[in-house]
Image (cartoon, grey):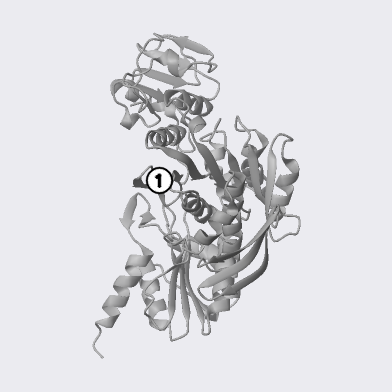
């Protein structure tokens, strides 16, 4: 239901100012929900027949009608095939986003919308932005990989950037809850699939670009072009401010491509950055740096470890600056930010060695994480990691090579195998092996973690990488509970019970 009205809008009202190619039926049909999955249709729904990677929504129109759909939106000829209202449009996904904005009374216009895109750092930056923006006691929503926060309500996330009806629906709830704005992650899939079509960002940040999702985008150039689209106005709107990491080569390229009406706030350690870091000091358990922005300078301290988190903190502060906040008021709060679940999260801190769980699942992210841990580890650096099934095969040897280069020993294991045989995933990973004596392949992830814990000695550091906050593993058509943090603590507890 529409949270902003007590009565359902009509089909004509939600299609106001939206182009269509053909219509049959009654424009006065009342509409109660926007649905893309025919199994969720209830009486009063509009069913959007979206063409997908695996299935085509056109095949489920009759099922949607049988379940009580009041209208159908499709890209195929309408005619008089059905006894309900039908709308033919050129692009169903773009139309879905435009209709969702109307259905929920354009809630984004009542909020400051701060977005974060890029390969690495989106979750940390978006969560830190929300934390900083709430320092004046205002309410801010959050849409991201770990959770959705809607004005006091917190929901587990099922997708980094959900479908457009969910985005605008949550924003409408944020408006009702009195939120000033929302901090949100923007994935490349969401951009390519028009989930953020027409969404006007107050400020949109670009963190970096490294190899990921090439199974979907095919090559790095296509991946970059998708990431660039919302900055260039190719998603129906341009951001008021683009916040771009100019330490990243692709960030420099993007900054030079911006339309003239988009203000640039750059960040990084480059002397040309609008918001820049100098005198960076990395220590166990803490990082610090001087921050310089137009007319001001200050000091930042953070418990987020590693050089890449200096960039993440800079990005968050640059976004706050772009949104009009006084950074001098926010700098003290950075040190109290508790971090993000599953992002370099320390497990069982009372051990004589360190154990961290992190979401790193690309070769670049693994290098960053391991480089940081190497600097604070007096002993050996151990790693448990895996590669997802039915995803970019090209990054598997690169991830393995990164681990072989940076770690003293590794256990390669299952991540989310999905419908791919773990043996086939291992074969791809093995082409990146350069030192076979430093790696063991163990199909069972729990067993791999157990062996790594047994091997860890005082002063060592164990990184369990790839899944981070996730609480499941995907096998073919089955999803089973699996949380690296919970499994690690459980194994440690069991090992303490062993007879001596």
Q: Nearer the viewer, residue 178 or 188?
A: 178
Residue shown at 59% from the left, 42% from the top? 203
Relative side of 115 to 444, left or right: right
Residue 404 position, x and y percent, is 57, 74
Q: Is residue 275 above or below residue 14?
A: below
306 w.r.t. 252: above or below = below
Which quadrant does the N terminus fall into? Answer: top left
| Quadrant in the picture for residue 367 | bottom right
Pointer 1: what residue? 148
Q: Nearer the viewer, residue 419 or 66?
A: 66
- For label 1, the crowd category at 10 Å Cα-Cα, with few meaning under 14, some 14 to 19 and many 20 or more, is many
Q: Position of residue 190 (x, y in %)?
A: 52, 40
Quadrant holding the C terminus: bottom left
Looking at the image, can residue 444 be seen?
Answer: no
The local secondary structure at tag 1 comes to strand
Q: Is residue 62 above or below residue 221?
A: above
Instruction: Identify the residue at horizontal 48%, vertical 40% (top origin).
Output: 181
Residue 446: image quadrant is: bottom left
474 displayed left or right of 303: left
The picture places residue 54, in percent across and down from the top left corner, at 46, 38
Q: Total label count?
A: 1
Q: Is residue 170 visible?
A: yes
Horizontal arrangement in the rendering, residue 281 relative to residue 343 (left or right):
right
Residue found at the very far bottom of the displayed protein: 500
Is 482 left, or right, of 314 in this rendering?
left
Residue 330 in the image, given as x and y percentages of width and height: 54, 55
Which of 57/456 is in front?
456
The residue at the point 46 percent across, 16 percent down is 87
């Amino acid at each position: 239901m529409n949270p902003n009205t007590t009565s359902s809008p009509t089909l004509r009202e939600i299609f106001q100012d939206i182009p269509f190619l053909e219509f049959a039926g009654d424009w006065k049909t009342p509409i109660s929900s926007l649905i893309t999955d025919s199994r969720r249709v209830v009486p009063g729904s509009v069913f959007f027949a979206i063409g997908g990677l695996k299935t085509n929504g056109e095949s489920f129109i009759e099922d949607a009608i049988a379940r009580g759909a009041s209208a159908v939106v499709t890209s195929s000829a309408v005619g008089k095939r059905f006894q309900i209202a039908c709308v033919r449009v050129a692009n169903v996904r773009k139309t879905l986003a435009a209709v969702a904005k109307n259905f929920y009374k354009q809630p984004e216009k009542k909020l400051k919308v701060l977005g974060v895109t890029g390969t690495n750092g989106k979750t940390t930056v978006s969560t830190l932005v929300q934390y900083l923006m709430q320092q004046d006691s205002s309410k801010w929503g959050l849409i991201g990989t770990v959770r959705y926060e809607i004005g006091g309500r917190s929901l587990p996330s099922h997708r980094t950037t959900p479908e457009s009806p969910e985005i605008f629906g949550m924003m409408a709830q944020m408006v009702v809850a009195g939120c000033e704005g929302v901090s949100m992650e923007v994935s490349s899939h969401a951009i390519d699939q028009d989930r953020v079509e027409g969404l006007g960002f107050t400020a949109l940040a670009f963190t970096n670009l490294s190899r990921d999702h090439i199974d979907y985008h095919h090559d790095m150039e296509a991946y970059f072009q998708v990431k660039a689209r919302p900055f260039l106005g190719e998603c129906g709107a341009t951001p008021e401010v683009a916040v771009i990491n100019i330490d990243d080569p692709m960030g420099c390229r993007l900054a030079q491509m911006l339309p003239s009406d988009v203000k640039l706030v750059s960040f990084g350690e480059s002397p040309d950055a609008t918001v820049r870091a100098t005198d960076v000091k990395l220590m166990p358990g803490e990082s610090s740096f001087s921050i310089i922005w137009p007319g001001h300078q200050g000091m930042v301290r953070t418990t987020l470890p590693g050089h890449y988190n200096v960039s993440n903190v800079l990005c968050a502060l640059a976004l706050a600056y772009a949104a009009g906040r006084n950074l001098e008021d926010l700098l003290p709060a950075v040190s109290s930010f508790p971090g993000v679940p599953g992002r370099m999260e320390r497990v069982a801190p009372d051990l004589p060695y360190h154990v961290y769980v992190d979401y790193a699942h690309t070769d670049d992210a693994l290098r960053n994480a391991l480089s940081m841990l190497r600097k604070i580890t007096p002993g050996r650096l151990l790693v448990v990691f895996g590669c997802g099934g039915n995803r970019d095969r090209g990054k598997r040897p690169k991830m393995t090579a990164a681990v072989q280069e940076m770690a003293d020993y590794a256990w390669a294991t299952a991540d989310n195998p999905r419908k791919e045989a773990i043996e086939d995933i291992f074969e791809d990973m093995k082409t990146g092996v350069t030192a076979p004596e430093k790696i063991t392949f163990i199909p069972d992830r729990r067993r791999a973690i157990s062996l790594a814990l047994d091997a860890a000695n005082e002063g060592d550091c164990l990184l369990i990488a790839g899944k981070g906050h996730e609480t499941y593993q995907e096998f073919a058509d089955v999803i089973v509970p699996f949380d690296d943090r919970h499994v690690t603590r459980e194994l440690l507890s069991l090992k303490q019970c062993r007879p001596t």
